[in-house]
Image (tube, grey):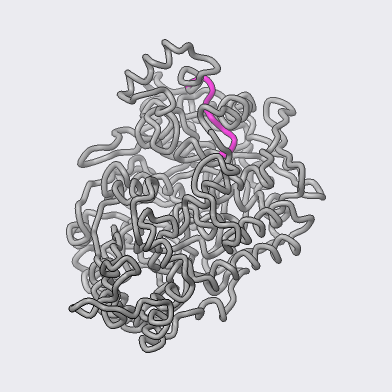
């Protein structure tokens, strides 16, 4: 089972014990920081750490130093580096092969009221930003009053932080302690914090925290209009609000070396560039069991690459020290054959995702939109795919044919949902298409749409397995008279097309299929098959596209509203499972194959890399492996 519900008190006790143990340590630090202390550029390590640092148990006490080399695809590839080091007020933890658990992050304790309405958090005493300034509840107040509730920065608050449309409330208790409350019970709040934290407008999303001492100069509650204009000009953006957000020039750690952070590393040389570098944070709040301030590794370098062949060549040439992102299952045999040559080993986690075709229910082409909204059309597209051939030819037989549904081991797994509309049946697919009036064809055998045009669908891809997979799917679709037109684009264009509602269909790994409660939004259409419907829902009709009155997606929205204010977990789970069932049985997303291993290449001198964990966006990808504890033998 992925998720253990009975972990809150036990994990808290473990962390409290390890924090208390910290006070007896004689702390050690990286030689590169010791040199700065000696030169008078930094205070001693015991003054940089909290009074009782968090103790992260390392599989093996490591040694300091090293430059961790990995690859990146360009400025738009910001989430890969971010997931190496995100911090949350509570975060997912897992021992190899064990259940997922929630553990405290940069706090000494937390508690939840009996009715799940009030959540109390206490920051580590002496916690500091990367520039040495104290982290206090004034930073929490700034986040809440001047950012979260600031309509200029957040026109609408995501429904995961405003269940039933009512945003969370904040109470500052003292310099370290604050309380968050909701009008109704909110049993899933901690899971949501562990996945998405407190969301926009930032990149690494340190829950409830923004460095007030630095960011107030870019905030309209503190800076004048002229000062904000000058700041926008300094960063080369059009308006001051462009300084904020996951791509914000000031608030995205990936772009701004001056931004104070609490993460293990901070940006040193930002994108764009052939090599982007991150350097250790001298004020990071955690130590290992021997009192060594973490992280062990001094720097992380991200080398730019253009395509999968170039990246795979970097691996074989020994230019990648450790990486999971872009290490593709379809190249598993290639990686294994070159282990000795590249001086690395291939490691495996379990992916909680399904490679899927995602049609756009909000596509601007009205005729195509009408077809995507037709259940028989979606079923025909699904059962026309020969999933077993895709698995064997593209994924080396490592996957299984399945629908976009919770994966095995998930508390929401249902075998009947996994197999919904997955049986290969082109004859039935043809009959379904004939039955909805698509019975006329052109001279090439492709069906004609109601407006007389050829029935063609453009599918966008940005993953390396896309072109060969789409060759198979396009051949399958040709058998039912549907023309599939694959189009390769880069990640930046990919995001833009989705944000601007400019795509017909996309091919990508549909994820967040482990602990669905931690982020149900992708099933509700967000950044997915019905982004404009989701925007309408979350903005209460202020923007986006309103779904028809009888549209079944409205039942998903209602189910999440019900789960968001359920009195207990049993009631919430029932509503969530209803949401999942509707999503899968409607077939809005066409799952193809999943349950693949998540592949990593790990150099022979790269230590403390754990095996047998869950790879999912919910668990923050490689971040679940606790990169602060990994080290490099010199």
Residue 487: quarter of image: bottom left
Magenta segment, principal secondary structure? loop
Q: Position of residue 599 (x, y in %)?
A: 36, 66
Q: Nearer the viewer, residue 607 or 467?
A: 467
Chain part drawn in magenta: 207-214
Task: Name the residue rendered at 34%, 80% in the picture.
Answer: 439
89 is within the stretch colored magenta: no
The reply, left or right, for residue 225 in relation to residue 338 is: right
Quadrant location, the N terminus:
bottom right
Residue 265: quarter of image: top left
**Most extreme residue toward the right, as rendered?**
114
Q: Nearer the viewer, residue 50 or 102?
A: 102
Above or below: residue 85 compared with residue 170: below
Residue 254 can be seen in this image: yes
Task: Name the residue rendered at 22%, 54% in the picture.
Answer: 319
Residue 400 can be seen in this image: no
Q: Nearer the viewer, residue 244 or 166?
A: 166
The reply, left or right, for residue 324 in relation to residue 583 is: left
Q: Position of residue 592 (x, y in %)?
A: 40, 74
Task: Name the residue rendered at 55%, 39% in the picture.
Answer: 542
Q: How many numbered marks are there? A: 0
Q: Position of residue 312 (x, y in %)?
A: 21, 61
Q: Position of residue 45 (x, y in %)?
A: 49, 30
Above or below: residue 116 compared with residue 44: below
Above or below: residue 216 compared with residue 385: above
Q: Nearer the viewer, residue 186 or 600?
A: 186
**Most extreme residue toward the front, as rendered?**
451
211 is within the stretch colored magenta: yes
Task: Name the residue rendered at 72%, 26% in the picture.
Answer: 174
């Amino acid at each position: 089972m992925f998720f253990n519900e009975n972990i809150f008190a036990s994990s808290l006790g473990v962390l409290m014990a390890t924090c208390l143990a910290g006070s007896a340590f004689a702390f050690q630090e990286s030689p590169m920081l010791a040199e700065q202390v000696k030169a008078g550029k930094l205070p001693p390590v015991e003054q940089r750490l909290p009074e009782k640092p968090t103790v992260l148990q390392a599989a093996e006490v490591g040694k300091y130093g090293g430059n961790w080399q990995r690859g990146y695809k360009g400025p738009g590839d910001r989430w890969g580096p971010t997931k190496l080091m995100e911090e949350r007020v509570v975060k997912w933890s897992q021992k190899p092969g064990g259940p997922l658990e929630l553990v405290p992050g940069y706090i000494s304790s937390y508690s939840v009221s009996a009715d799940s309405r009030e959540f109390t958090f206490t920051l580590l005493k002496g916690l500091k930003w990367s520039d040495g300034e104290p982290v206090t509840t004034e930073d929490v107040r700034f986040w809440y009053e001047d950012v979260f509730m600031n309509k200029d920065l957040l026109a609408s608050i995501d429904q995961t932080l405003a269940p039933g449309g009512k945003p969370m409330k904040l109470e500052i208790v003292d310099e370290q302690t604050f309380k968050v409350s909701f009008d109704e019970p909110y049993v899933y709040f901690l899971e949501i914090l562990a996945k998405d934290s407190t969301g926009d407008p930032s990149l690494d999303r340190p829950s409830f925290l923004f460095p007030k001492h630095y960011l107030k100069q870019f905030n309209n509650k503190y800076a004048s209009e002229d000062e904000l204009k000058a700041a926008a000009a300094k960063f080369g953006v059009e308006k001051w609000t462009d300084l904020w957000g996951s791509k914000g020039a000031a608030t995205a750690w990936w772009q701004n070396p001056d931004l104070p952070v609490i993460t293990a590393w901070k940006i040193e040389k930002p994108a764009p560039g052939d090599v982007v570098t991150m350097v250790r944070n001298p004020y990071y709040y955690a130590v290992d069991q021997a009192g060594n301030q973490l992280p062990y590794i001094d720097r992380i370098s991200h080398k730019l690459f253009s395509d999968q062949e170039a990246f795979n060549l970097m691996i074989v040439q020994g230019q990648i020290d450790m990486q999971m992102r872009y290490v593709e299952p379809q190249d598993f045999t290639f990686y294994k054959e070159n282990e000795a040559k590249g001086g690395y080993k291939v490691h495996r986690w379990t992916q909680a995702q399904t490679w899927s075709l995602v049609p756009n229910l909000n596509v601007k082409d009205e005729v195509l939109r009408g077809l995507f909204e037709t259940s028989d059309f979606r079923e025909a597209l699904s059962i026309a795919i020969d999933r077993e051939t895709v698995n064997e030819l593209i994924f080396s037989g490592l996957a299984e044919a399945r629908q976009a549904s919770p994966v095995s081991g998930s508390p929401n797994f249902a075998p009947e949902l996994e197999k919904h509309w997955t049986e290969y049946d082109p004859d039935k697919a043809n009959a379904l298409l004939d039955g909805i009036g698509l019975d006329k064809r052109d001279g090439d055998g492709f069906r004609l749409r109601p407006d007389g045009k050829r029935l063609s669908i453009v599918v966008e891809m940005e993953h390396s397995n896309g072109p060969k997979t789409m060759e198979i799917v396009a051949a399958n679709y040709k058998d039912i008279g549907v023309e599939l037109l694959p189009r390769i684009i880069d990640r930046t264009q990919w995001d833009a097309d989705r944000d601007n509602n400019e795509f017909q269909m996309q091919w990508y790994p549909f994820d967040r299929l482990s602990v669905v409660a931690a982020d149900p939004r992708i099933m509700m259409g967000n950044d997915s098959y019905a982004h404009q419907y989701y925007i309408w829902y979350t903005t209460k009709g202020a923007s986006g596209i309103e779904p028809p009155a009888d549209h079944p997606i409205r039942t998903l929205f209602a189910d999440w509203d019900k789960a968001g204010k359920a009195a207990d977990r049993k009631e919430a789970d029932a509503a969530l499972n209803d949401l999942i069932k509707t999503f899968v049985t409607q077939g809005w997303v066409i799952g193809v194959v999943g349950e693949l291993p998540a592949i990593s290449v790990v150099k022979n001198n790269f230590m403390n890399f754990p095996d047998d964990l869950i790879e999912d966006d919910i668990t923050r990808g490689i971040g679940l492996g606790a990169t602060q504890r990994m080290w490099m033998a010199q």
